[in-house]
Image (cartoon, rainbow, N blue to C red):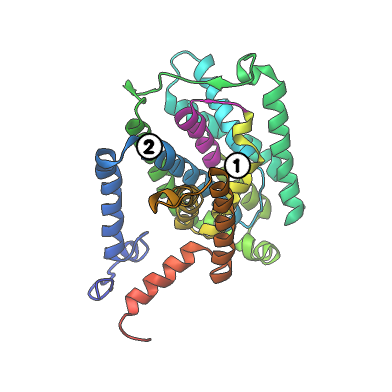
Amino acid sequence: MLYRENGQFKTSYRSDQQVFPILQDRVAIGLLLLFACVAVPLLAPEYLFRAILIPFLILSLAALGLNILVGYCGQISLGTGAFMAVGAYAAYNFQVRIEGMPLVGSLLMGGVFATLVGVLFGIPSLRIKGLYLAVATLAAQFFTDWAFLRIKWFTNNSASGSVSVADLKVFGLPIETPVQKYLFCLAFVVVFAILAKNLVRSHIGREWMAIRDMDVAAAVIGIRPVYAKLTAFAVSSFIVGVAGGLWGFVHLGSWEPAAFSIDRSFQLLFMVIIGGLGSIMGSFFGAAFIVVLPIVLDNMPYWFGIPIDTALAAHLTFMIFGALIVFFLIVEPHGLARLWSIGKEKLRLWPFPH
């Protein structure tokens, strides 16, 4: 009975078209942000920040970028790890080669260069689609792996091939403790989530969805496939590139190209599929599923005092994790976000059956 729209009258187009038209949703989002900004930094232990919260936020941001391309525009990509790597290495070069370069500026410039690479590898989408496009974007993964391993300029002539950053500061404030890193990542995620939510509701977002549903019909009604597809690649690569910079600078601190391998690309694609294609909320659900569930499964035998070998526990984790992925995709192929939407609709009608 609490989740109802009774008495919430829309008296203007602005109120009817707001992001969260239901008052309860706006209150819930506000309370969630307040909890994330105030309660979590005060209550959460250091392990929770390092192992779960910071990776969850950064991978949510990367999944959000990929969801714009795959979920909203329907262009399959297996090169997400490559665009993360471009963003991380570009941000690193801006940081070490330009004296006094702000950290936020380096991360955003890393996203800009990831955009350029994403548009370059998105050009084949004008002629091919489906699995053929996936293979074309997969080429970006192999190319960046080779470039960052062989071209020493990208790593500032590092002998080992790995790079590292230290003494991160934003507006003179240090970003050193897990709480500071968490709040820094949270700020990026909130800003980009709001921008993405409004972007997919705009005319360009409707063009992306028209291309996704039927590109021939979209072209007939006046939508330019070239513009729509390349802008989707550009926006997606920018967000993914910023996430790659955060992954290298904030989460890892020191990294090499293996940190952005093809496994990362598949991991992000699984997040989008499990969380829900074409859903901003689904990106967060998918990231939570991929990041949190393996840790829970690894520690569950110890919580219940079950004596089990470490190797066996690791294999059981992979087996159960894979089985749950298959189960969720069978129960709801549209992802966890669809289950969330169904639950909200039932709450709006409960206790009435219609």
Query: Which label lies toward us, 2 or 1?
Result: 2
Task: From the top left corner, tell me how far across and down residue 248 is, in percent.
Answer: 51, 30
- Could you tell me how many numbered marks the image carries? 2
Task: From the top left corner, tell me how far across and down residue 234 is, in percent.
Answer: 59, 43
Where disc 1 sits, the SS reads: helix
The answer to which of 288 and 298 lies nearer the viewer is 298
Q: Amino acid at mark 1?
A: Arg
Residue located 54% across and 58% down the image: 274
> Which residue is situated farthest in the left direction here?
7
Magenta-colored segment: predominant secondary structure: helix
Where disc 2 sits, the SS reads: helix
The residue that disc 1 covers is: 264
Circle 2 Cα neighbour tier, 10 Å, few/some/many (<14 / 14–19 / ≥20): few
Residue located 56% across and 45% down the image: 236
Q: Is residue 114 visible?
A: no
Marks 2/1: CA–CA distance = 22 Å
Q: Is residue 279 visible?
A: yes
The residue that disc 2 covers is: 47
The answer to which of 120 and 77 lies nearer the viewer is 77
Residue 101 is marked as none
- The quadrant the N terminus occupies is bottom left
Q: Amino acid at mark 2?
A: Tyr
The magenta segment is 238-256
Q: Is residue 298 left or right of residue 141?
A: left
Q: Does residue 252 belong to the magenta stretch? A: yes
Q: Does residue 247 belong to the magenta stretch? A: yes
